[in-house]
Image (spheres, rainbow, N blue to C red):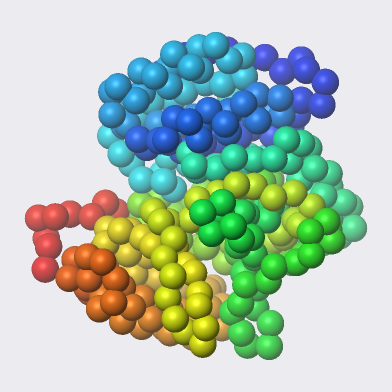
Amino acid sequence: MIISGLNSTEMNFSSRTKAITVAYNPDLNILRQQLESLNHQCETIIIDNCSEKNLLNQLYEYCNLKTHVLIISLDRNTGISSAQNTGIKYVLENTPDSEFVLLLDHDSVPSFGMVNALEKQFDYLDKSGRNPAAIGPLLYDPRDRKHIGFHSIKSCLWRKVIPLQESGPIECHSLNSSGSLISLKAMKAVGLLEKDFFMDHGETEWCFRALNKGYRIFGSSDFSMIHHMGDDVVEFQFFGKRRMPYRSPLRHYYIMRNSIHLQKKPYVPLTWKFWNVFKIAFTFVYFGFFSRESGEQRKYIIRGIRDGFQGITGEFSQNEAA
């Protein structure tokens, strides 16, 4: 349901980019912060993945006061990648002059001026012959008080690179979907996101598919964006104190299952596949034995690995629980 028209007459307001935010029972305070920032940067399309009625009504009331926001409300939870595809298709069909989509989760807050800055850096990379498909900002999780960095392959290592701030764009091999400014030209050539993943690793698969088609992926250190990774942040000891996102058993089901699907795809880099095996093992050992909900974590992680090998996709089905 579209609840408000789109109007883009403000100075420095981009007509080239449409932001697509997927919302599912969002924290409205954080989502309002996101929309306040975007209201002066670009038009925003919210794809609501069948949130609770009370939350959705509050979102309607708030967005009715805005001039650059529309809501498409889905009658069921279709998953993150499928909802993003719904927004992308809307942009392609209804705003054919648009050049980019900015993908966002409902718990991300872009910096003021980020959209315009990412467009300019994309243009620079494109004009210099770098053939970019997407560029994303440096993510910052306020709970961890740390920048998250960009994933890159170097010397057979899959690692996170945290560049110096304002050091310009760096090449990487995948981006978090939230904050990614994606060229619609590249999207048409590469294809939409993998909807059957439902959630988790949809952006990873798309980036690898784009790389396989000759495109390149970049991260920008000039702007950061607040983004909440996982449900919480936990500390653990491994050669010193470390912190990492805590995810629910269901989230780990999707991560494990879709990781196995990626292992089987021929265009996924061998370096990623090699290190992904270690990540799967670490996730199982740590969350399956040393975290809260360890019993449920083991159950869902094992189920995800099993379903991945069996080729099962889509939404988790409790009826087939192990």
Could one spot residue 148 in this view of the protein? Answer: yes
Q: Tell me how many marks there are.
A: 0
The picture places residue 294, in percent across and down from the top left corner, at 22, 71
If the image is split into quadrants, where does the C terminus sit? bottom left
The picture places residue 309, in percent across and down from the top left corner, at 28, 75
Residue drawn where x is 70% and y is 68% of the image? 162
The picture places residue 73, in percent across and down from the top left corner, at 38, 25
Left or right, 5 with respect to 223, comes to: left
- The relative height of residue 4 versus residue 84 in the rendered view (above or below) is above
- The relative height of residue 259 versus residue 33 in the rendered view (above or below) is below
Residue drawn where x is 31% and y is 81% of the image? 285
Residue drawn where x is 41% and y is 65% of the image? 234
- The relative height of residue 50 versus residue 215 in the rendered view (above or below) is above
For the residue pair 69 and 242, the one nearer the viewer reads as 242
If the image is split into quadrants, where does the N terminus sit? top left
Could one spot residue 191 in this view of the protein? Answer: no
Residue drawn where x is 82% and y is 21% of the image? 11
For the residue pair 151 and 205, the one nearer the viewer reads as 151
For the residue pair 312 and 244, the one nearer the viewer reads as 244
Q: Give the farthest residue toward the right.
A: 128
The picture places residue 65, in percent across and down from the top left corner, at 55, 11
- Identify the image quadrant of residue 263: bottom left
Left or right, 183 with respect to 255, comes to: right
Left or right, 242 with respect to 146, comes to: left
